[in-house]
Structure formats: structure tokens, C-alpha cells
Amino acid sequence: MKKIIFLLLISAQLLNAQSLEDLHFGTDSTFEVISWNIEWFPKNGQTTVNYVQTILTNLQADVYALQEIDDTTLLKSVVSNIPGYECYFKSSYYGGLAYVYNTNTVQVNEKYEIYTSQPYWNAFPRSPQVLELTFNNEDYVIIDNHLKCCGDGIIDTNDTSDEENRRLRAVNLLKTYMDSIFPNDRVIVVGDWNDIWTDPTANNVCNS
């Protein structure tokens, strides 16, 4: 049976309850994936760089799925200072997606983007990024996303430029992809959905 897990950002509660030097998450035997929209890294220059390096180092997650990486060269530099970690991003465009992963716990088998051609650009302003990996002899697939922002909270299926409609089509395309390519795999879908999952069903991009 397929297992689809949606993981969210690091919560403010976690950061308020611990100092940056005392961050902890998970255990050595569990598989931890953290999704984090860093917001135009490095938004505040070296201050952002220092904080991000400290957080990534101290949380020691197996995989970080990141969004809004503005300076990919600087992210490479940050990760090079974290022993045992590597980073991957397919695109170097503005606001790209990226993975940072622990090479001591994770064996990366494949990494690529999907829905990259022009017919899908409306639904996916940023092509989803896929990481196929093995952790503790178990195979997993992670799909990192950053869907279209904004909107009025109402899905207009007759308007291809409607933000909610674009997110709805993206979610449906992701489901189609998983059903056809990974029907029996452990699939973890993460990212910045730019939507409210508690919206009423009629205007909920994940339930419509």
C-alpha cells in the first residue's frame, strides 16, 4: 500500500522552545525529513547564512527539502561546512528548490525534476524535484514542491490563471504521477503549498 506523508515546515514552537545551539529532532534510528521555505535565501545576508548553517547542523535531519533558494552558490558554501551533508538542486533559477541530505544515513539513488515542459508551467511555476533514496534498507521517494502563491481563496476552474485553480491542477498532476510511477512505494510529498488545508471542500485544492 502506498504511504503518502505530508510534512510541514519547522514550527515556531520548536524554535521558541529551544535555543539554536540546543536544537534536536528525531533519533538515530528514525527517518527525518524537514521541509523549509527559507524565503529568498539569504534574505538577510550573512545573518541568514549563519542561522541556516546552525539550524541545519544542529537538527541533524536525514533530508531537508528547501524552497526559495536565491543564491545557490552560497547554499553550497553553507553545506560544505556541515560534515557529512551534500546539497542538490537541478535548477539555478531564482527561488529554486533544493535538497540537503546526510550522506552517512541516506543513499541517494536518483534525483531529477518532473513536469518540466511548457504545458505544465502554468500549474507548476517551479518544477517539482524528486529524490529517490534508501534509508536503513528501505526505499523512499520524496517530492519537493513550491506551488503558485496568492489568490482569493476561491477555485475558479474556468480561469487557467486563477491561483487556486493552478494549485488544484498541480495537486492533481502530482497524484497522477504518483499513481502511475510509484503505485506501491513510500512517497513523501513536501514543500510550500501556498494554501490553507482547512478551506471548505469546494475551495480546498487538496480535497476538490
Image: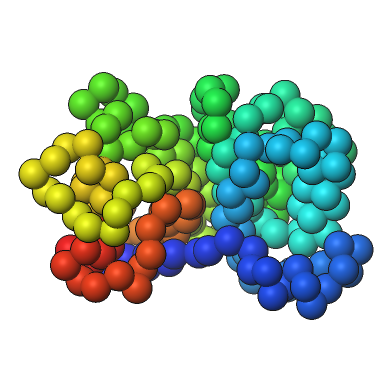
Q: Nearer the viewer, residue 2 or 14?
A: 14
Residue 52 percent coordinates (x, y): 78, 47
Q: How is the image coloured?
A: rainbow
Q: Is residue 41 above or below residue 22?
A: above
Residue 193 appears in the rendering: yes
Quadrant in which the C terminus is drawn: bottom left
* Left or right, 184 with reference to 74: left
**Residue 26 quadrant:** bottom right
Q: Is residue 2 above or below residue 52?
A: below
Residue in the image at 16% along x and 67% along y: 202
Quadrant in which the N terminus is drawn: bottom left
**Residue 58 quadrant:** bottom right
Residue in the image at 54% along x and 37% along y: 97
Q: Is residue 157 above or below residue 207?
A: above
* Left or right, 53 with reference to 186: right
| Name of the residue lying farthest toward the left | 158
Residue 141 percent coordinates (x, y): 45, 52
Q: Nearer the viewer, residue 37 or 144?
A: 37
Residue in the image at 80% along x and 30% along y: 77
Residue 88 appears in the rendering: no
| Name of the residue lying farthest toward the front | 152
Residue 20 percent coordinates (x, y): 86, 62
Residue 158 percent coordinates (x, y): 8, 44
Q: Nearer the viewer, residue 148 or 142?
A: 148
Number of numbered tags placed on the structure image: 0
